[in-house]
Amino acid sequence: MPKVIKANGSLEVRKSEAIVKARYKLSLLAIRLINVVLSNIKETDDVNEEYVFKVKDFQEILGLKRKDFYKAVDKAVDELLNTIIKIPLNDEQKSILKVNWISSAKYNAGEVRLKISDELRPYLLELKERFLKHNLEYVLNIGSNYAVRMYEILKNSFELHNRYGNKPEITISVDELRERLEVPRIYRYNHIKTRILEKSKEELKKHTDIIFDYEEIKTRRKVTHLKFFIRPNPNKQINYNIMDKYFKSRRNFVALLRKNYSGNKKFFGYKTIDDEFYWLGLDNKGLLYATSPKSGIKD
C-alpha cells in the first residue's frame, strides 16, 4: 500500500552531504515537490515504497491559485523522472554517480504516486553522519530555485563547521558554484552576482534560519572565488533556541551536554549574548565553555 505524503512545513528534510554537493538543476516547483517527498521518507520504509500525494493538497500548502497547477505538477514530475543528478562518490569528485530522482510516476484521479530511484535511496536513508537536515518550511517558502540550492550548500557548511567548532565560512570557486547549480554559460559573473547571490541573500534572510555575506576573491582582476560568511538568522532565532529551557538552568544544560556530547569535542547549541552568537559545548574534561567567532574563548 502506498505511503500517503503529508505536506507539512514543520517536517524535516534529510539528505546526504553528497546530494548537497551534487550537480543538478530543477525548476522551483520540482524542487519543492521532491523535498516534500523527502520529508516523508523514513528509514523503515519498504525498498519498493511508493509515495502518493493529492495534487490539491500540494497546491494548498504552497498557497498557489494558478489554474494550470495540475499541468505544472505534471511537468515537475517529468523533470524528476528525466533530470540527471550527478553525485560525487569521493571528495575529489573524480568518481560520479548519475541517477534520476524518481524511477516511476503513476496518476489516478488527482493523485500522483512516485517511487524514489533505487540507487538514490542510500543517500536518503540510514544517514548517520555527513548529512544535511532542515525544515521543509524553508524550502517551500523560498521563491527561487537557485536560492534553494544556495541555502542547502550554505546550511550544510554552517552545520559542518559548527559540529567541529570552526567558524562558519566556506570558500567556493565561481566555476565550482556554476557547475553545482548548472548555471548557463551565457551567465557572466555579474549575472551570477545579481540573479543568484544577491537574490539568495534576500530570500534566505526573509525565509530561512541562516543569513550570509560574501567576499569576492580576485585573480588578475577577475572574480574567481567567493568566500561566504554564514550565521544564524536573528529573525528566526526560535530555531536556534529550541534548547532554551536548558540555557535557563545551567545545571540542566550541563547535565544534557555531559550525557550527549562529553568527550567528542562537539558543540551543542547556540546562544545570542549582546547581539553576538556563541557556540556552547563541553571540553574533554566535561567543563562548560562557549566560543565566539569574533571574540575567541569566553569564560
Image (cartoon, rainbow, N blue to C red):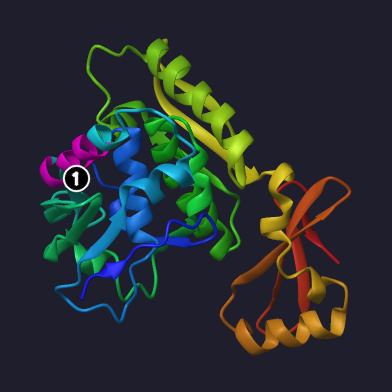
Instruction: In the displayed orientation, state which residue is furthest to the front.
Output: 109
Left or right: 218 in relation to 67: right
Confirm whether residue 13 shows in the render: yes
Residue at point 43%, 18% (across, down): 195
Q: Quadrant of residue 230?
A: top right
**Is 92 contained in the magenta span?**
no
Q: Residues within 10 Å of mark 1 (few under 14, many from 20)?
A: many
The answer to whether residue 285 of the structure is visible from this angle is: no
Q: Which residue is mark 1?
A: 80
All told, the count of numbered labels is 1
Residue 175 x/y as whole percent: 29, 28
Of the pair 75 and 243, the residue shown nearer to us? 75
Quarter of image, res 7: bottom left
Q: Position of residue 75 (x, y in %)?
A: 20, 35
The C terminus lies in which quarter of the figure?
bottom right
Q: Position of residue 216 (x, y in %)?
A: 50, 22
Q: Residue at x 40, y 42 (%)?
A: 59
Q: Nearer the viewer, residue 221 or 278?
A: 278
Identify which residue is drawn at 19% across, 61% down: 116
* 253 lies left or right of 138: right
Give the residues in magenta: 73-82
Q: Main secondary structure of the magenta part?
A: helix
Q: Quadrant of the N terminus?
A: bottom left
Q: Secondary structure at mark 1?
A: helix
| Image position, residue 160 (x, y; %) | 49, 58
Does 174 sit above or below residue 5? above
**Taking 87 as reference, is 60 left or right?**
right
284 lies left or right of 149: right
Amino acid at pointer 1: Leu
Camera-side residue: 19 or 134? 134
